């Protein structure tokens, strides 16, 4: 009886693990034609409005990768990011990064300009892009 209970528990645990959605492998990317990719520190400065080069491409505010990017790359939560940008916009010292709604749009924008930077799930990266950092 004990062995049957144990095997049922193991089966349940395996089923639960297999049912979990696959986690994204978050990567920072630039055009494959970018000659000198920026450091992750410079990328964060761009996403937080402290520099204009490289030009950041952001996902929409409700996109799961956006919060994960700011947390892992820049060590900022959504409230901190909104606060930083509110201050920059209020003082006229910045303009929000361009947004792309879908990974394909991010790829197209990055591939077209080697001075842009973005983030994607690694599964969405193709030969038009170069991974400069993995954030997992």
Image (cartoon, rainbow, N blue to C red):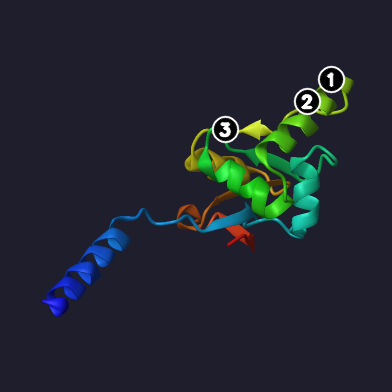
| Residue 27 figure quarter | bottom right
User: Mark 2 near mark 1, Cβ–Cβ under 8 Å?
Assistant: yes
Whether residue 118 can be seen here:
no
Q: Earlier in the sequence, mark 2 or mark 3?
A: 3
Residue 33, horizontal then vertical, whole percent: 66, 56
Q: x, y (%) of residue 47?
A: 74, 42
Q: Quadrant of residue 15?
A: bottom left
Which mark is first along the chain, 3 or 1?
3
Q: Is residue 98 above or below residue 56?
A: above
Q: Which is nearer the eye, 68 or 30?
A: 68
Q: Position of residue 90 (x, y in %)?
A: 84, 20
The residue at the far bottom in this view is 3
Disc 2 crowd rating (10 Å Cα; few below 14, some 14-19, many 20+) is some
Mark 2 to mark 1 CA distance (whole Å): 6 Å
Query: What is the spatial separation of the Cα atoms under label 2 and label 3, in whole angstroms?
Result: 16 Å
Secondary structure beneath dot 1 equals helix
| Residue on which the image places disc 1 | 90
Task: Residue 128 in the image: state x and y as whole percent.
Answer: 55, 54
The residue where tag 3 is placed is 60
Tell me, for residue 73, which label it has, or none. none
The kind of secondary structure element at disc 2 is helix
Give the position of the N terminus as an image quadrant. bottom left
Question: Circle 2 is placed at which residue position?
Answer: 86
The vertical placement of 127 against 49, above or below, is: below
Residue name at image x 63 percent, y 48 percent: 69
Classify residue 120 as left or right of residue 28. Answer: left
Q: Residue at x 88, y 27 (%)?
A: 93
Q: Are marks 2 and 3 in contact (CB under 8 Å)?
A: no
- Alpha carbons under labels 1 and 3: distance apart: 21 Å
């Amino acid at each position: 009886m004990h062995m049957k209970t144990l095997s049922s528990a193991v089966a349940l645990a395996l089923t639960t693990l297999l049912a979990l959605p696959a986690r994204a492998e978050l990567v920072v990317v630039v055009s494959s034609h970018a000659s000198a990719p920026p450091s992750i520190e410079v990328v964060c400065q761009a996403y937080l409005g402290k520099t204009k080069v490289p030009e950041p491409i952001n996902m929409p505010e409700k996109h799961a990768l956006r919060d994960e990017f700011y947390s892992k790359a820049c060590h900022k939560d959504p409230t901190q990011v909104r606060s930083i940008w509110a201050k920059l916009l209020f003082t006229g010292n910045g303009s929000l990064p361009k947004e792309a709604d879908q990974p394909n749009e991010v790829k197209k924008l990055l591939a077209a300009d080697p001075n842009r930077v973005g983030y994607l799930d690694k599964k969405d990266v193709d030969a038009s892009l170069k991974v400069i950092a993995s954030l997992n």
